[in-house]
Image (cartoon, rainbow, N blue to C red):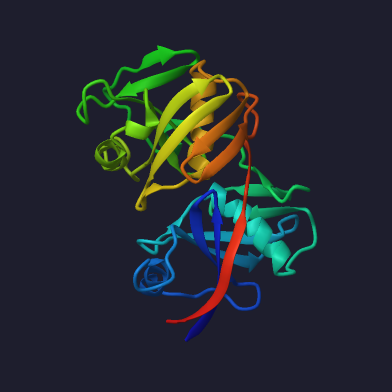
Amino acid sequence: MRLRFTKMHGAGNDFVVLDGTRAPVALTQRQLQHLGDRRLGVGADQILAVERSTTPGIDFNYRIFNGASGDEVEHCGNGARCFMRYVHEQGLSQRSRVRVQTVNRVLELALQADGRVTVDMGEPVFEHPHIPFDAKGLVPRAVGDFQLWSLADVAPGVEVAVLSMGNPHAVLRVEDAAHADVAGLGPAIEHHRRFPQAVNVGFMQVLSRQAVQLRVFERDAGETLACGTGACAAVVAGVRLGWLGHQVEVHTRGGDLRIEWLGMGSPVLMTGPATTVYEGEIEL
């Protein structure tokens, strides 16, 4: 079969976007892996499917597949921004604000006048069973109004804040993000037994109360140039730990994101770029 696709990226986090509004996206896991393969296919961190919704008040269904494994995953913030630009550029919607349904939450996407996209990412989740995180037998260190959890069996001194943005995150503060041991600590924390569904791992350097440098080792993908949910998780953790203010510029290797969070009971707002690279067809 020949499949049309659009290649996009949000701050270097890259995607293959598929139009499922006319016919369902019914690809096998092997076909999804082929699409995501950077040598044999198109190559992408995630594969995004745009589908019509039959739910009142929801404009589209937003499905996300890991580009390496082909598994459907819960959330991708950078992908959400590309989703919004895609539906505009493809004429699927002329509205500047749409609501989309993911596997486990509803997102509101807004196209700004300067071309950037703001995503209402919803409220962060802190309840351990819903992250999920197994804290049995651990004693946290209280900082601000949050906790840091020791993973000393990974490496001495490793402490993480844990939360979910619709997908699980562990946030680790480092002195120098550029020289952090992302390749070593990333997979060790990702597959740590305390995270039964594995976890995305953020390495955050606090530059000021309004700015951080961030690298993220993503679950099943490795380090990516940017991670939208990771940026949100890092800022939320930083606010609760007392390190950050309520509006923060997150500098990633792929570009800058603005994250806003007013505190408990409030949604996280993420604003950043979304870029179309090219359109094409591939034989699957």
Could you tell me which residue is drawn at 59 percent across and 28 percent down? 248
Can residue 222 be seen here? The reply is yes
Name the spot of residue 223 as percent of width and height, x first. Answer: 37, 46
- Quarter of the image holding residue 5? bottom right
Of the pair 252 and 49, the residue shown nearer to us = 252
Name the spot of residue 154 as percent of width and height, x first. Answer: 22, 31
- Quarter of the image holding residue 62? bottom right
Name the spot of residue 145 as percent of width and height, x first. Answer: 50, 15
In screen coordinates, is 206 left or right of 10?
left
Can residue 53 be seen here? The reply is no
Q: Is residue 99 above or below residue 169?
A: below
Q: Is residue 272 above or below residue 95?
A: above
Of the pair 212 and 63, the residue shown nearer to us = 212
Residue furthest out toward the bottom: 1
Of the pair 132 and 33, the residue shown nearer to us = 33
In screen coordinates, is 92 left or right of 218?
right
Could you tell me which residue is drawn at 43 percent across and 13 percent down? 143
Q: Is residue 187 above or below residue 19?
A: above
In screen coordinates, is 56 left or right of 167?
right
Quarter placement of the C terminus: bottom left
Name the spot of residue 242 as percent of width and height, x first. Answer: 52, 15
Q: Is residue 262 above or below residue 95?
A: above
Of the pair 56 and 243, the residue shown nearer to us = 243
Q: How many marks?
A: 0
Could you tell me which residue is drawn at 43 percent across and 57 percent down? 45
